[in-house]
Amino acid sequence: MKVPYLDVKNQYNLMKEEIDAAIRSVIEDCSFIRGAYVEEFEKNFCEFLGGGYGLGVGNGTDALEIAIQALGIEKGSEVIVPSFTFIACPEAVIRNDLVPVFCDVDPQTYTLDTDDLKNLINPKTKLIMAVHQYGHACHMDEIMRLAEENDLFVIEDCSQAHGALYKGRLLGTFGRMATFSFYPGKNLGAFGDAGFIFSHHKDSINACRMIANHGRVEKYVHEFVGRNSRMDGIQGAVLNVKLKSLNEWNQRRSQVAALYDEGLKDLEEVIIPEIEDWCDPVYHLYVLRVKNRDKLQRFLTDKGIGTGVHYPLALTQQPPFKGSRDRELFADQLGSEVLSLPMGEHLTDDQVSYVVSAVREFYS
Ligand SMILES: *Cc1c(COP(=O)(O)O)cnc(C)c1O
């Protein structure tokens, strides 16, 4: 049996006619950059998030960069970023002439460790980047309390957490702004690069809109030097179609996760994802922690099972950021232990059972 790690074609197969028709309309209307389809998606995605303001942009990395720029933070200030996540997060900080400070992640949620976070806050700190890793929420009550006490902004990176909840409330609705990636492999994926910035603050989204559109106030008047990062019409149209199924697909991910949990929880050698009772995750990834990860990965590959490693190195182990912390972090050990099993609405129960049996066979 073959079990693909990811199957981006599946969603297209499920709704081929609707997606083809949507793309055809964009082409017929020549609504290539922004335009009615993107505006409709902005409206729909804000509705999905319970109401607010939103802007479609070029990709999830741009979304972070632009959102940070819109805060107008003084150059050289510090931004707290998790030490174990995608490199886009510190990149967006550095591109704004700010300094990323790497916070450890905790062994339960793999998100910002709030004890370490507390110690890192100092007068130069201006922003906390709360990344909801693998689709599991950060400790939002503690993060928002620390932000309030110290007068810090919070940006939530929801690139792996479309539709996930913290204490029943949608992620992306806590911070000053939230960013999303619609990279094709995300829970909600476009047919190319696309990203989103969401906020309850109209001013923040207006600032982002100007930054992302050449600092424009009208067609040939540029109030400041901006940049070009706009969502394409085709991406807006595809996302409008797919958004309708996001909750259903997320539910299927949770069912798959429950089957993995049930099949693997008694294995001593395997740590399954720990879900806090205050979180409804969306399982962007289903990540095991194991001691002999590379061997297990090879074993699964030989059985036709696709896997991934998110991420092989902590950010503090990547060349640009080496030695930026004063001590060894929990995150430093994670890179050699994490293994992402196949995850997505494309998986059948039989495929999941096959993966479970293969992992069990490896340890028998
Ligand atoms: C995917 C991802 C991004 C970047 O999104 P792109 O659309 O690929 O630029 C940023 N942050 C996190 C946590 C991500 O998973």
Image: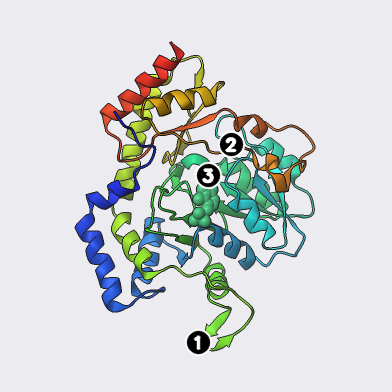
Give the quadrant of residue 56.
Answer: bottom left
Q: Is mark 3 within 8 Å of ligand 1?
A: yes
Q: Is mark 2 within 8 Å of ligand 1?
A: no
**Which of the pair 336/105 is nearer the observer?**
336
Residue tagged by mark 2?
Answer: 312
Query: Marks 1 and 2, how far apart in space?
Result: 45 Å
Q: Residue at x 47, y 46 (%)?
A: 160
Residue tagged by mark 3?
Answer: 132
Q: Position of residue 344 (x, y in %)?
A: 35, 40
At mark 1, the secondary structure is loop
Q: Nearer the viewer, mark 3 or mark 1?
A: 1
Q: Residue at x 44, y 23 (%)?
A: 299
Q: Is mark 1 within 8 Å of ligand 1?
A: no
The amino acid pointed to by label 2 is: Pro
**Which of the pair 100/310 is nearer the observer?**
310
Q: Position of residue 345 (x, y in %)?
A: 31, 41
228 vs 90: above or below: below
The amino acid pointed to by label 1 is: Lys
The answer to whether any part of residue 157 appears in the image is no
Q: Is 76 on the left or on the right of 13, as rendered?
A: right
Residue tagged by mark 1?
Answer: 219
Badge 3: how crowded within 10 Å, few (<14), some, or many (20+)?
A: many
Mark 1 touches mark 2? (CB < 8 Å) = no
Q: Is 267 on the left or on the right of 245, as rendered?
A: right
152 vs 352: above or below: below
319 vs 312: above or below: below
Q: Nearer the viewer, mark 1 or mark 2?
A: 2
The amino acid pointed to by label 3 is: His
Q: Residue at x 32, y 61 (%)?
A: 238
231 vs 137: above or below: below
